[in-house]
Image: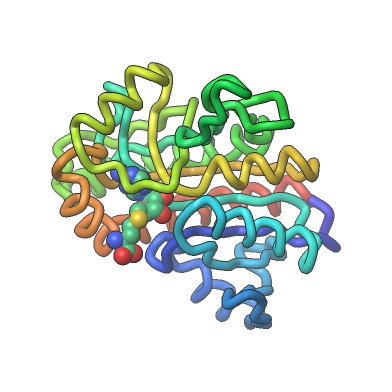
Amino acid sequence: MNPSRPLGVLAALPEELGDLLATMRAESGVATRTLGQRDYHAGTVHGVPCVVTLARIGKVAAAATASALMHAFDVEALVFTGVAGGVGPAVRVGDIVVGETLLQHDMNAEPLFPRFEIPLLGRARFDADRALSAALADACERFVAEEGAALAGRFQTGHLPRVHRGLVISGDQFVASAQAVGALRAALPDALAVEMEGAAIAQLCHEYGVPCAVVRTISDTADEHASTSFTSFLTDIAGTYSTGVLRRFLAAYAAAAR
Ligand code: SAH
């Protein structure tokens, strides 16, 4: 960590930030700057200088916010936290997915470019930063080991949460039918989770050489029950997961810099 450059931490929705802003307020105070209808909150959280903001929903919103974090705040790296629909057969509600690779599932410029490829970049898949993702996965594993049994009881998911690492796919679509999630599974058999922002951020981070990592708690399984499951999960659970994972991740990030 370079203490002169902050870490950018973002989510789509306020619930997904957990207690991050409250912790910043208590630890260092918060300096807020508004740009493009978004509030960027600067301060220190668990010993790490951070700029925390809400990207809002979708790929354009996420890319614009990531760009502002890079250019107006000179962030050293970006971490995205939030919820997602489970796509992989072993991925269940209450599990956590760390996105090692990200892809935009609604990009299709055929026949000019292969399906999913981002025109002119020559690739469909963007890798998250290895070291950051490993540190994030480690924070998730410790969170699940320390709080998983209590969470499974409290939220009645019926199983201990698992941490998965692999492909996360993003598109400007809330996936909410067996047919839609089935089509994604058929086209991208290794996809673990679907959401609406991560791969846009990964593309920008690739283009600008800024390391990024994405962590998603599974709120639904992208089928007919997705919207009810998503809504109840977001209110009750998303914040608890983000709080538990980010606290461990940021404390380790600060310790590694000392
Ligand atoms: N109804 C919500 C909007 C939800 S959009 C509102 O009014 O605020 C869903 C958000 O959660 C997106 O940010 C996306 O990244 C994530 N997400 C969770 N489940 C998803 C799914 N099944 N498909 C796509 N995105 C999903």
In the image, taking residue 104 as reference, residue 5 lies left or right, namely right
Q: Is residue 35 visible?
A: yes
Q: Quadrant of residue 224?
A: top left
The residue at the point 32 percent across, 48 percent down is 174
Q: Is residue 244 left or right of residue 129?
A: left
Q: Residue at x 26, y 64 (%)?
A: 235
Q: In the rendering, at what x and y percent does residue 58 appear?
A: 47, 54
Instruction: Residue 206: name its quadrant.
Output: top right
Q: Position of residue 238 (x, y in %)?
A: 34, 56
Residue 147 visible here:
no
Residue at left 66%, top 56%?
66
Give 157 or 218, whichever is nearer the viewer. 218
Q: Where is residue 5 drawn, in percent x and y? A: 81, 60
Left-right relation of 109 to 121: left
Q: Residue at x 26, y 39 (%)?
A: 222
Depicted 109 relative to depicted 79: above or below: above
State how many labels appear: 0
| Position of residue 90 measured from the top left corner of the image (x, y, whole percent) | 28, 23
238, 196: nearer the viewer? 196
Pick whichever, 64 or 16, lies toward us: 64
